[in-house]
Image (tube, rainbow, N blue to C red):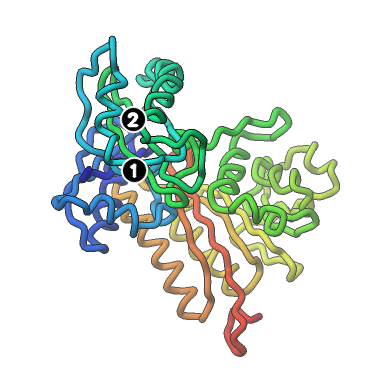
Amino acid sequence: MNKVLLYCRQGFEKECAAEITAKAAEREVYGFARVKEDSAYVLFECYQQGEAEKLIGELQFSQLIFARQMIVVGELLRDLPQEDRITPIVGMLSGAVEKGGDLRVEVPDTNASKELLKFCRKFTVPLRASLRKAGVLLNYESPRRPVVHVFFIAPGYCYVGYSLPHNNSPFFMGIPRLKFPADAPSRSTLKLEEAFHVFIPADEWDERLASGMWAVDLGACPGGWTYQLVKRSMMVNAVDNGPMAPALMETGQVFHQREDGFKYRPNRNNNYWLVCDMVEKPVRVANLMVDWLLNGWCREAIFNLKLPMKKRYEEVSQNLAMIEEKLKAEGVNAQIQARQLYHDREEVTVHIRRIWSAVPGRRDER
């Protein structure tokens, strides 16, 4: 298996391909990306055998922006016979994977694949039984073992392979399944909820999304992101010249500041969270976030960078590099992640966590 398969948002195959090619070259893994427009996946084929395994072992999935999943696969299985699709799949996986901890039978996230997904759900049960019998899967699920993936791109056509535990997306098809809350003021609320799932480990939610925290939402109107903070019993300064949803104001947890988000300055020094989903040029938003982090006005920030029509990967990369450079120049230690979430459109969501240093004299000691 010398290929790396990456799931992505339909229409962003070129960005995903550019990213994996650049990340692979940084690790001296060379190959070429096969891109089919609007397919919702990218296939990166390595020149040397064994380098696909090396790549998914060295490249942290959390560093990828446009990929929803990252797996090693072999050649495309074609024209699987309707009377026995299982035997060729088991044969391809035997010897390539041993004692996998889970099985996911998936499809690209496209409208054309919706009918195929129904088949995959039915097919999973008999396939799982056969893989367990062949020793490809354990007889029980285990989060410590590789995940076996079967990725159907059309009826009778699939890639098979595996992803590594703790270096993949834990979600089926790389998509968190979230339900829109009926009382939320806008569907944008799902962006922030998904960001929490993607960027913050579940076992750290009690500490980092705690009741009683103070937060600031820049460009808050009508309150989709504020809703997520209020839902977690936080106190929120919602900054926007527009109106906020009355139900949020009635909670007593929201203080509406009718100001421009770029001009607003916090009146308290214990804000933990800053969130921002303003429609503005990405470089302007990125610089605003840097100001907040350098001044110590927040501990963690989640914000969206709107994407241009062309050179979207380059634009995001430049802004992230600028943020990292400015923070380092001032001695601020920070963890930076970015991902095009399922609920994003022409944008990328960024998460920055400022790590307070224990070294005296450092700026991030403040």
Residue 75 position within the rendered picture, expressed as x and y whole percent measured from the top left: 20, 34
Callout 2 crowding tier (Cα within 10 Å): few <14, some 14–19, many ≥20: many
Does residue 258 lie above or below 272 as drawn?
A: above
CA–CA distance in space, label 2 to label 1: 10 Å
Front residue of 330 and 309: 330
Q: State the residue position of label 2.
A: 151
Quarter occupied by the C terminus: bottom right
Does residue 232 lie above or below 131 as drawn?
A: below
Please name the residue shown 59% across and 79% down the image: 357
Relative to 154, is 174 on the left or the right?
Answer: right
**Badge 1 amino acid:** Ile
Relative to 10, is 216 on the left or the right?
Answer: right
Q: State the residue position of label 1.
A: 71
Front residue of 205 and 312: 205
Residue 208 position within the rendered picture, expressed as x and y whole percent measured from the top left: 68, 58
Q: In which quarter of the image is residue 245?
A: top right
Relative to 40, is 236 on the left or the right?
Answer: right
Callout 1 crowding tier (Cα within 10 Å): few <14, some 14–19, many ≥20: many
Mark 2 residue element: strand
Q: Which badge, 2 or 1, comes first in the chain's sequence?
A: 1
Please name the residue shown 76% across and 58% down the image: 213
Quarter occupied by the N terminus: top left
For the question of whether residue 81 can be seen, the reply is yes
Front residue of 8 and 316: 8
Mark 1 residue element: strand
Residue 206 position within the rendered picture, expressed as x and y whole percent measured from the top left: 72, 54
Front residue of 342 and 296: 342
**Badge 2 amino acid:** Phe
